Structure formats: structure tokens, C-alpha cells
Image (cartoon, helix red, strand yellow):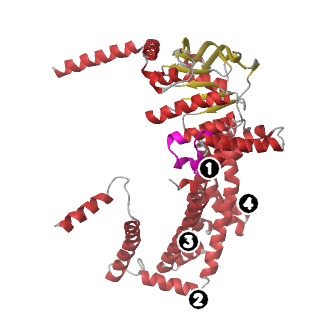
Amino acid sequence: MTTKISIQAAHKTFGSGDKAIVALQEVNLEIGSNEFVTFVGASGCGKSTLLRCIGGLESLSSGSIKVDGVDINGPGVDRAMVFQHYSLYPWLTVTENIKFSRNLRAGREDLTSSDVEAASGRADALINLMGLNHVRDAYPNQLSGGMQQRVAIARALLSRPQILLMDEPFGALDAQTREVMHDMILHVSKLEKTTIVFVTHDVEEAIYLGQRVVVMAPRPGRVDSIYTVDLPAQRDQDMKLAPGFLQQKKAILTRIRETAGMRTDLELLERMTQQAAQHMQ
Amino acid sequence: MMLHRKLMAGWNAIWVIRGNLSRRAYLLFALSGLLLPLAAWWGISVSGWMDKVFMPGPLDVLLRTYTWFKEDDLTGDIWISTYRVLAGFTLSAVLAIPIGLMIGTYRPVQAMLEPLTDFIRYMPAVAFIPLVMLWVGIDESSKIAIIFIGTFFQMILMVAEDVRRVPITQIEAAQTMGANRGEIVKLVIVPSAKPALLDTLRVTMGWAWTYLVVAELVAANSGLGYSILRAQRFMQTDKIFAGIILIGLIGLTIDQLFRWLHRRNFPWMYKK
């Protein structure tokens, strides 16, 4: 497997002086071509920041992120991004949203007329792939959350990005819709041969989707550990109940709790209970 | 008993917090909201509690409007006042929308212009009258200038706020699709803020009308505001009433026009 994304000694600090917060510290990571990598971690661990840095929406304080060996410089059409919500354009129909990047100069550069034709076919193909045919002329606010995310994914895929960055894309969906979306995105990743970097707070989701699960730790944000997922490439919802799956889920959850310093919270809860008991007497 | 219970249930149903109201019930409430004050006004005027000089009745006002139309130049007054308001309003919109767009989009522009605008908008427009007369003169442009001063600075800040309310993810999504700055402004920020901008225009149009009377303090010899001011001098309370109500009615019409434009231009906001 060739390396697609290479993160070297990545540091990111927000603010300065006493108020400086270290969001990323010494992150080193290689992500392979057509790999599906998921990121989990307690809040404040920098997983979203890292994703936004890869997407070029934030810049590193030091270190580098390379795609195909070339330093990234801001956002680019090779790295598409899907957000948790509010990213669709409510004044455009589903089809118009998906074709949005066709209006941009970056998408039109050195295009021949046959390319334009192919792109139009591409939009249709994506609409079919995502099961959006019956709503192609609807507006986003007429759609359910799950359908809206399908549109967002189709829009991101239109210009055939090599990398798809997903920031808790299914976080706002109900459990059943989420399962459907999981199998859909796995199908897409196989079909499109896209490298997918996927941030989530749901460990089960992370294992089910990822070939590797990267656990990040907070304060300062850093890579804590990496788990290789040992599941057949062709995933199936029943696997979530297999002992191996559950074991790995437990291991990762425990690790996240340890990095988050949950014990202090328990101590606090105990103190509060004691205080309350004293007041009652 | 059954009927009583049914009525009670219906009564409770319409007072649900943020509840729904049938179209018929809505019209009923809207009409009574308009007609009750009118009836109260008529009641007071026929009861003889108040002198007609202080409180003319609806009929007196209607009659006065008729004579104003017949013997005086009511149509001309309406026309010139509408012209002044629209001219002042359009001028301020044409300038405030691009400036507000820049303030809401680029931080340096915000830092440079927003505190200044905040400072100026607290200055009373009326106090500018002597300066406007000095700089602009006493012709039509001076009235337009007063309306402009009254609305422009508020409008800038409201437009900037509308632009700032465009969700950042809409902008970032465009960035990750390779949009440059110009494309983001043109294809994301402007269309996304448009419905809010139209609402801002609707609200500021109301303010423009409230500045009309002030504007027509400046050496005017026609217009609704001017007629109100002159009627004051001759204690023609019925004419004052007529002028105020006419301004209100024109305002209401324009307001409805804006709402209609909103529904027509942004159908996606009304589809659920």
C-alpha cells in the first residue's frame, strides 16, 4: 500500500501566551492509499482539528502534512470534506447542490467539452448511487437528516477527490439511519477507491468502518494508540456482535476513558454525594 | 354541556405555546386587532368625552381625506413623499449592502468601519438638518439626504449581521470544493444571506418612512409629512390624523409587497 497522506511532527496551538491551548502535539501518521482510517477520542483531543488541518481549513503551527509527497497549501479539490450538518446550500435543489463545484473555476480548469459531458453523467451516477433519484429536485430542508448527508457526500465526491475527510458526518442521525449510511459509505469507498479519514465519537462506528482506528488523547491533543481492525473486508452488521469486535470495542473504550481522566469525575461525583448526604442529616 | 366542552377545548387549543391557528381563526383575530381600536376610536368620538379639536372621529378624518384629495393635492403629496422615501431608501440600500457585505466578510473592513458606523448611528438624524441645508441646500436632495442619514448607518450594521449569520460550514464546504474568495462571496455568502437581507430592507423601509416628517421639516412645501406639520399650525387635528393614517397604510402596503417578494424569491424557505 502506497502512502497517501503523511503527517510529520504536526503541532497546532490555538491562542498565545498564557491562554495558549495545544490542540495537536507531535502527531506523526501515515495514511495509505484507499485506506479507511477512523479517529476517536475524548472531546478536546484534537481529532477534528487534525482533520481540518488535512483539509486545509486550518494550518499547522509547525510540522507538515503531505499528500502524495507534496506539502498541502490550503484547501484543494483533491481533498473533499463532509461536515456534520448545515453545509448544504438550502437555496439549491439536490441536483444543483451536487453539481455545485461545476460552477467553480477550480473545477473548470482545462476541461474539454467531453469532460463537461462526463461530469454531468457523473452527477447522475452519484445521484443513483446515493439513492437520491426520487428527490433530485427537492430542496435540502425537505429532506431527512440522512438524505441530507447523502447529498453532502455526493457533492463531495463529484470532482473525484482522492481523499474524503468526514467530520462526524453521521453524528446527528438516528441509529437505524446510521447503519444504512455505514454500509453505503463502505460501498462508496470500495467503488471510488477514495482514501477516507473519518472522525467520530462512536467507537462502534469507528471499528465497523475503519481498517485502523486511531485513538487520540486530550490536553495536549495527541495520538495515543492505533488499533488495527481484524474484520473481513466485506463488513456485515452481525459482526458488531462477534466476540472479537466487542473485545476491541471494550479495549478502545477503556483506553479513551483512561486518556480522558474520567476518574477525577467519579471522585467529584462521590464528593457531591457525600455533601448532599450531610445536608440531609 | 357538550357544546360548552367543545368550545373550551377549542379555546385551550389556540393558546398552546407556539401553537397553530386555522386560517379562519387567524383572519378573525387579525381583523379584530384592526377593527377594535377603530371601534374604540369611533366610540370615544361620538360619546363627546373629548373635544373634536383633540380627537376627531373616523368620519371627520375620512371627510378631511376626501376634501384633501378634492380641493388640495393629496395625490401629489403622496407621490412626492413616496418619491423622497424611496430615493433616500434606495440610495442607502445601494451603498449599505456592499459595505455591510464587506464588513461581515472581511475582518479588517469590520475593524475599520464598524466602530465608526456604531458611533455615527447614535447621532440624531434631526440634528443633521442644519448641516444638510448648508451642504446640500434646500431642494429635493436635502430631504432625501435626511432619510438617507436616518437609515444608512443602521442598514450597514444590519446587513453586516445578516452576512455574518451565514453558517461557516456552508463557506468551508465551498472552500474544500476549491472555491476562491470571489466565488465564495458570489456563490455562497450572497445567496445564503439574501432572504435575511430582504427582511432587513423591509424593516429599514419602515424607518425610512418614520424619517419622512423630519425630512419634510426642511423647507418643504409639499408632501404628507409637510402637510401634517402645516395642519399642526392651524390646529387641523383631523388632517394630522389623516396624514398619519395614510403613511401607515402606505407602509403596510409596502411591507406586504416585501413579504410577497420574499415568498416569491425564496420558495425553498416555505417548502417543508
> Residue A145 colored magenta?
yes
Which circle marks residue A93 in the picture? 1
Q: Is residue B54 above or below residue B170?
A: below
Q: Nearer the viewer, residue B245 or A10?
A: A10
SS at mark 3 in the image: helix
Measure the C-alpha gap from mark 4 to mark 2: 36 Å
Chain under disc 1: A
Q: Which residue is mark 4?
A: B135
Disc 4 and disc 3: Cα gap in Å? Answer: 31 Å
What amino acid is labelled 3 in the image? Answer: Ile
Q: CA distance from mark 2 to mark 1?
A: 56 Å
- What mark, if any, has residue B250 been given in the picture? 3
Q: Position of residue A278 (x, y in %)?
A: 20, 18
Q: Secondary structure at mark 4?
A: helix
Residues indicated by labels 4 and 2 sit on the same polypeptide chain: yes
Name the residue at 52% across, 17% down: A231
Q: Chain of mark 4?
A: B
In the image, are marks 2 and 1 on the same chain? no
Along the line of sight, the residue nearer the viewer: A124 or B265: A124
Magenta-tinted stretch:
A129-147
Question: How far apart in space, not on screen, are marks 1 and 4 (Cα)?
Answer: 51 Å
Secondary structure under tag 2 reads helix
Secondary structure type for disc 1: loop
Q: CA distance from mark 3 to mark 1?
A: 36 Å
Please tell me which residue is depicted at 62% across the width and 69% down the height of the picture. Answer: B216
**Would residue B57 be found to the left or right of residue A1 on screen?**
left
Please report, as a chain letter, where disc 2 is located.
B
